[in-house]
Image (cartoon, rainbow, N blue to C red):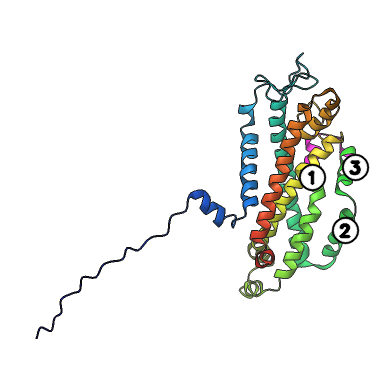
Amino acid sequence: MNMHSEPMNLPLRKVQSAPKRSLWRRIYHGVFGGDALGFFGALLLAVLLVVAIIGPLLVTHDPLLTTPKTLLPPSAENWLGTDHFGRDVFSRTVTSLRIDFIVAGLGVTGAIFIGSFLGLVCGYVGGWFDELVMRLVDIVQSFPLLLIAMVLILVMGPGVESIIIVTVLINIPTYARVIRGEALSRKTLEYIDAARCSGASEASILFRHLMPNTLSPIIVHGSLNLAAAVGNVAALSFLGVGIRPPTPDLGVMVAEGTNYLIQGAWWMSIGPGLVLAATIFSLNLVGDCLESRLDPRRAEG
């Protein structure tokens, strides 16, 4: 009897590989967690940032050049028409977007560095320094921030530099309070005790172990705060205490355009207003998406 049986020729099943996702679909699900609004906000924000970065290449006219062609409607030569001084509204809008991004970005960045440092020190060290800083934070946050900004600008004088400094000052309390809470909740955790037992200095614990674990709330609040900062810059300029003409600014352009709406020159304020609204809207969408992705309490909910 033949002990060696012939191998059976069984049909082989083809293992079907999962269809590969496109790059955009991987980003949509991997980075944004399937958040359609967050993904849309990021795309819109990316377009606005690109326009702001390459703005000098896009402008078709000198944004400060006055001409006799006043209050012309949108045309092939002037895409968003001209204003009451004959300046090209499209060129001024693109330049304004660039300026507002720079002003708000520098202001929020400065507030993040100073406020986060104060919050870390207050939460980790505590004592009289913590009490003093937190009482000052309470005093500042008890007043409307826009009112404080107006008073500070009236003291320092209007201008781009003043707006940046004011943006830093009025946003420091937010980061100081948030990061202080993170430091208080984390300084008693085991990895901090382990670092202390291993001989790490207090400065090393503060900046090498504690600070990196506060990046998530900084990113979330930074994105949302940037939207508020852009709105505040425009609001101050709209009220006449921010960036002063002839420097292009979205708030100034909207304020000037409202005076000519009754004459039918809607393009003076509609174009800059839509760009301003799109900027704030996209930043808020991105901020909400980051909060849902980076905040474990919201992720669990």
Residue at 65%, 35% (x, y): give it: 52
Quarter of the figure with the C terminus: bottom right
Residue at 78%, 42% (x, y): give it: 231
Dot 3 falls on a residue whose secondary structure is: helix
**Residue range corresponding to the magenta coloring:** 155-168
CA distance for labels 1 and 3 = 13 Å
Provide residue 159's location: percent of width, then percent of height.
81, 34
Which residue of the protein is positioned furthest toward the bottom in this rendering? 1
- Mark 3 or 2 closer to N-term? 2
CA distance for labels 3 and 2 = 18 Å
Dot 1 falls on a residue whose secondary structure is: helix
Q: Which residue is mark 1?
A: 167
Magenta stretch: residue 158 in it?
yes
Which residue of the protein is positioned furthest toward the left in this rendering? 1
Q: Residues within 10 Å of mark 1 (few under 14, many from 20)?
A: many
Provide residue 222's location: percent of width, then percent of height.
71, 51
Q: Which residue is mark 2?
A: 138
Q: Which residue type does callout 2 highlight? A: Asp
Q: Which residue type does callout 3 highlight? A: Val
Residue at 67%, 24% (x, y): give it: 79
Magenta stretch: residue 128 in it?
no
Which secondary structure class fits the magenta region best?
helix
- Mark 1 or 3 closer to N-term? 3
- Mark 2 or 1 closer to N-term? 2
Residue at 76%, 56% (x, y): give it: 175
Q: Residues within 10 Å of mark 2 (few under 14, many from 20)?
A: few
Q: Which residue type does callout 1 highlight? A: Thr
Q: Which residue is mark 3?
A: 151
